Image (spheres, helix red, strand yellow):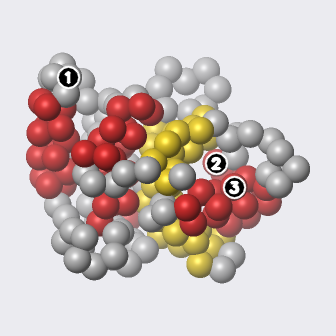
């Protein structure tokens, strides 16, 4: 699948961003793993089947970080774990350090999912980082699929460094 722009995203005023972020990682697998095209209904069908298998309540569809790792596994994407971005000598508290962490996380497997949560916000939002090419990072935002695509790594890091609470990546 090309990096974008994407035309499929979550419905307005829904809490399905985690499911769409996971599904786009699935669709970004090498050819032959799964079909390269998907619809909004495909994602909702997979979400509903998985939630039913987990005996999760109907009516609210937000997904926790551990549940999202389980959903990835259900989709056939195993080996993903969640971690909190930490400041280290390799990943200093700078946009460049954060961009390097995202590039490294995306290189571990087919991509990574970021949980973005602004300070004081009651809930967060998931976006998918599909890959990086040179200085750019390919990102998919389920709430704004038409604006997804290639972003300069530095501007991407400046925008998301202070709001990312978890990174889900292949280890």
- Pick whichever, 53 or 97, lies toward us: 53
- Of the residues under marks 3 and 2, which one precedes in the sequence? 3
Q: Are marks 1 and 3 in contact (CB under 8 Å)?
A: no
Relative image position of residue 112 (x, y in whole percent): 50, 54
Is residue 95 rendered to the left or right of residue 57? Answer: right
On the question of residue 19 being in view, the answer is no
- Pick whichever, 136 or 108, lies toward us: 108
C-alpha span from label 1 to label 2: 30 Å
C-alpha span from label 1 to label 3: 33 Å
Which residue is denoted by mark 1 in the rendering? 56
What kind of element bears circle 3?
helix
Which residue is denoted by mark 2 in the rendering? 160
Q: Do the residues labelled 1 and 2 touch (CB within 8 Å)?
A: no
Is residue 4 rendered to the left or right of residue 60? Answer: right
Q: Which residue sits at x=72%, y=61%?
A: 100
Q: Which residue sits at x=25%, y=30%?
A: 61
- Location of residue 152 (image quadrant): bottom right
Furthest residue to the right? 89
What kind of element bears circle 1?
loop
What kind of element bears circle 2?
helix
Relative image position of residue 137 (x, y in whole percent): 59, 68
Q: Which residue sits at x=80%, y=51%?
A: 91
Which residue is denoted by mark 3 in the rendering? 101
């Amino acid at each position: 699948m090309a990096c974008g722009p994407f035309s499929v995203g979550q419905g307005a005023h829904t809490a399905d961003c985690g499911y769409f972020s996971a599904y786009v990682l699935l669709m970004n697998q090498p050819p032959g793993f799964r079909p390269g095209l998907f619809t909004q209904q495909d994602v909702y069908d997979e979400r509903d089947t998985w939630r039913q298998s987990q005996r999760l309540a109907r009516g609210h569809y937000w997904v926790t970080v551990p549940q999202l790792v389980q959903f990835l596994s259900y989709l056939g994407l195993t080996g993903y774990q969640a971690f909190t971005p930490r400041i280290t000598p390799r990943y200093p508290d700078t946009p460049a350090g954060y961009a390097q962490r995202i590039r490294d996380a995306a290189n571990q497997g087919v991509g990574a999912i970021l949980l973005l949560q602004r300070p004081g916000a009651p809930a967060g939002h998931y976006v998918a980082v599909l890959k990086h090419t040179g200085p750019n990072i390919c990102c998919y935002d389920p709430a704004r699929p038409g604006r997804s695509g290639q972003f300069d790594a530095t501007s991407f890091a400046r925008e998301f460094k202070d709001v990312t609470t978890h990174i889900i990546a292949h280890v």
